[in-house]
Image (cartoon, helix red, strand yellow):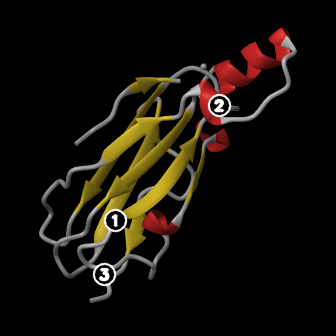
């Protein structure tokens, strides 16, 4: 599944991707593999996340955009609005590897691969 979302000038190198779901040897067979796409400082563009399994088949990817209420903040309304605007550019992603073999996770921002994407994830551990 591909997730397209509007996220703030395009600076794909300012998009951070982190989590076990994009690390080389950290996914488990039939267990959720998760990662976060953080585009708070990157400007406005579309984010797309795809995962391809070892048989070159696209996999289902769950992508959840964080809500502003997911963070603690003081009651200062200007600060709250800034937090809300930036927090909505953070995406929690997960997929479940169901085949043994290398998987490829691609994250694009403005149709351009972000730094280090695509991620080559080694064979899921059984």
Q: Position of residue 34 (x, y in %)?
A: 43, 59
Q: Is residue 112 visible?
A: no
Q: Position of residue 47 (x, y in %)?
A: 44, 33
Q: Residue at x 23, y 73 (%)?
A: 30
Name which of mark 2 and mark 1 comes first in the sequence. 1
Label 1 or label 3, whichever lies nearer to me, is 1
Task: Say if 90 sits above or below 79 in the image.
Answer: below
Which is more toward the observer, 72 or 5? Answer: 72
Disc 1 element:
loop
Name which of mark 1 and mark 3 comes first in the sequence. 1
Label 2 crowd (10 A; few <14 / some 14-19 / many >=20): some
The quadrant holding residue 28 is bottom left
Label 2 or label 1, whichever lies nearer to me, is 1
Quadrant location, the N terminus: top left
Q: Position of residue 65 (x, y in %)?
A: 47, 33
- Residue 124: mark in rendering: 3
- Residue 32: mark in rendering: 1
Separation of residues labelled 2 and 1 (CA atoms): 27 Å
Name which of mark 3 and mark 2 comes first in the sequence. 2
Task: Say if 27 sits above or below 58 in the image.
Answer: below
Label 3 or label 2, whichever lies nearer to me, is 3
Which is more toward the observer, 16 or 66? Answer: 66
Q: Are marks 2 and 1 in contact (CB under 8 Å)?
A: no
Disc 3 element:
loop
For this orientation, the residue located farthest to the bottom is: 126
Q: Are marks 3 and 2 in contact (CB under 8 Å)?
A: no
Separation of residues labelled 1 and 3 (CA atoms): 11 Å
Label 3 crowd (10 A; few <14 / some 14-19 / many >=20): many
Q: Residue at x 49, y 72 (%)?
A: 23
Question: Is 36 displayed left or right of 62 in the figure?
Answer: right
- Residue 42: mark in rendering: 2
Separation of residues labelled 3 and 2 (CA atoms): 31 Å
């Amino acid at each position: 599944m591909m997730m397209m979302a509007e996220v703030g000038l395009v600076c794909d190198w300012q998009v951070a991707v982190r989590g076990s779901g994009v690390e080389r040897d950290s996914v488990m067979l039939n267990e959720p593999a998760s990662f976060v796409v953080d585009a708070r400082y990157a400007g406005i563009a579309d984010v797309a996340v795809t995962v391809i399994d070892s048989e070159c088949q696209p996999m289902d990817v769950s992508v959840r955009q964080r809500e502003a209420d997911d963070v603690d903040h003081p009651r200062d309304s200007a600060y709250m609005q800034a937090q809300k605007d930036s927090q909505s550019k953070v995406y929690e992603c997960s997929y479940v590897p169901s085949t043994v073999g290398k998987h490829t996770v691609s994250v694009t921002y403005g149709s351009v691969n972000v730094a280090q994407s695509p991620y080559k994830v080694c064979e899921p551990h059984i």
